Image (cartoon, coloured by chain):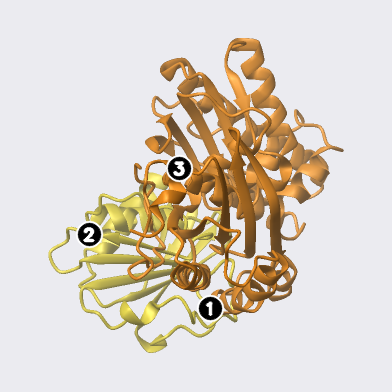
Chain colours: A yellow, B orange
Amino acid sequence: MIFSTHTPEETKQLAAHFASTLHGGEILALEGDLGSGKTTFVQGLGEALDTDAYVRSPSFTLMNIYPTKHKTIRFLVHLDCYRLGPSCNLQGLELEEWLKRPDVVIVVEWPPYHLPIEETSIRITFEMVDVQTRNITLPP
Amino acid sequence: MVATATFFLSFMRILAIETSCDDTSLALVSHGDGTFVVEKNLVSSQVDTHTLYGGVVPEVAARMHAEQIAPLLYALEIPQDGSTVDAIAVTAGPGLVPSLRVGVACATTLATAWQKPLIAINHLEGHLYSCWLANSPPLFPCIALLVSGGHTELIFMKDHGVYEYLGRTRDDAAGEAFDKVAKLLGLGYPGGPLISKKALEGQKDVITFPRPMKDSADFDFSFSGLKTAVAYHLKDHPDDRPEDICASFQDAVVDILVSKTLKAVEKYQPTSVLLAGGVSANTSLRETLKNTLTERFPKIHYHHPPLAYTTDNAAMVGVAAFFHLQKNKVTNPLTLVADPNLPLSPL
């Protein structure tokens, strides 16, 4: 389903709404150009899952981990493969310890072609329509 | 327990190791008569390799650190028994774990084999101490603006090892904004030097980009909206000169960084202002901050590291380690592990 947002706040609200459907164990793959609202969406997820940490772009650090105070989700793991490129295999990031954990939500910006446990990942796409408007496609 | 007597040597030589990201760096830094001498600072950059891959690959980065660290150590010409070295310093975080581990393994091994004190250093602390490699040492208290690919932080430093975070970026780091705007313009990687070079031939007042959070009441930064504004401007004005876009974008970044730093200076009344990190190599930022300070606060000293020590290097790690040693803060080589989220903690 496609949602249009007109401010970063609206993007965060949409993310919060989406967060209420999460239980833990999900992998979210966020696709969209630079400036299309991906990190803003993750900020909304972080707020909704009740993390004290600032959600910042992990483009440089590659992976940020935010502890949350949600009732079933304990950690939001924020990956960004912008610098790694689409062919990367995520080896060496020690992602294994976070995968398949029922109390962890993993969100990946610039997801590579091959995500581990690809079949369970949820794809969310972002499109910049004009200077304010973003079209965000969530799974039905 | 190990070689405590060395802490009070009037002359001291530190072997420093930095492998937190793309560069493998080893340095020999000595201190005597109150001044630091960088005897050797070797940096083996992986930028070419990562440009080939279009980015940093953690596995590749770690493997390259492992390949380069032994030849660099050899090039320092330290006797095999380590007798000319008094202590060993290493960056323990933050950074990429596989990369950090190579440096930490090397440092803990040498410290154990040579029976020398080991000092674990925070990468950000290293950047702050790069300012002690300038001509005159900064005087406390200091306001430090630390800007790099991964960081944009305003830090109040009351004394050696006493840090108070005033503000930081809420989304993208300043260096990241440079990299991403360079990518939008098709300029390549790393973006900072490419943009500032193009900006020299551009007009900075042709386009007015937004200055997110410039006038906010706190000391935090935000660069994500600026990057988006450039992306959107490009979509709408595909024929604008890239030189003008670079100059206008750079002007916005510098304006935000300088305004926030000045605001912190007004509030905290420091004796010195420090500018450090990879983005501190940006000439426009250096000059604007310096000139604005001189104009508005002529009594405040301004320090930035020599150009060679703006990007990641081991010399700055050695300098920071000297001040740890002075406070007897050493690390147990048997328990030191690389920490990707290592906080900047007080001495």
- Mark 1 packing: few (<14 Cα in 10 Å), some, or many (20+)? many
Q: Nearer the viewer, residue B35 or B345?
A: B35
Which amino acid, by three-letter code, is at mark 2? Thr
* Residue B77, percent from left and from top: 70, 66
Residue under the point 68% across and 69% down: B72
Answer yes or no: do the residues labelled 1 and 2 have beta carbons within 8 Å?
A: no
**Residue B126 against residue B98 in the figure, above or below:** above
Give the residue at mark 1: A112
Secondary-structure class at tag 3: helix
**Residue A65 against residue B142 in the figure, above or below:** below
**Residue B221 against residue B41 in the figure, above or below:** above
Quadrant showing the C terminus of chain A? bottom left
Residue A122 - label: none
Residue A68 - label: 2
Give the residue at mark 3: B8
Q: Nearer the viewer, residue A80 or B138?
A: B138
Q: Residue furthest left?
A: A71
* Residue B10, percent from left and from top: 54, 40
| Chain name for mark 1 | A
**Residue B298 against residue A105 in the figure, above or below:** above
Q: Are marks 1 and 3 on the same chain?
A: no
Which amino acid, by three-letter code, is at mark 1? Pro
- Mark 2 packing: few (<14 Cα in 10 Å), some, or many (20+)? many
Disc 1 and disc 2: Cα gap in Å?
Answer: 26 Å
Disc 1 and disc 3: Cα gap in Å?
Answer: 53 Å
Left or right: where B185 falls relative to A133: right
Disc 3 and disc 2: Cα gap in Å?
Answer: 46 Å
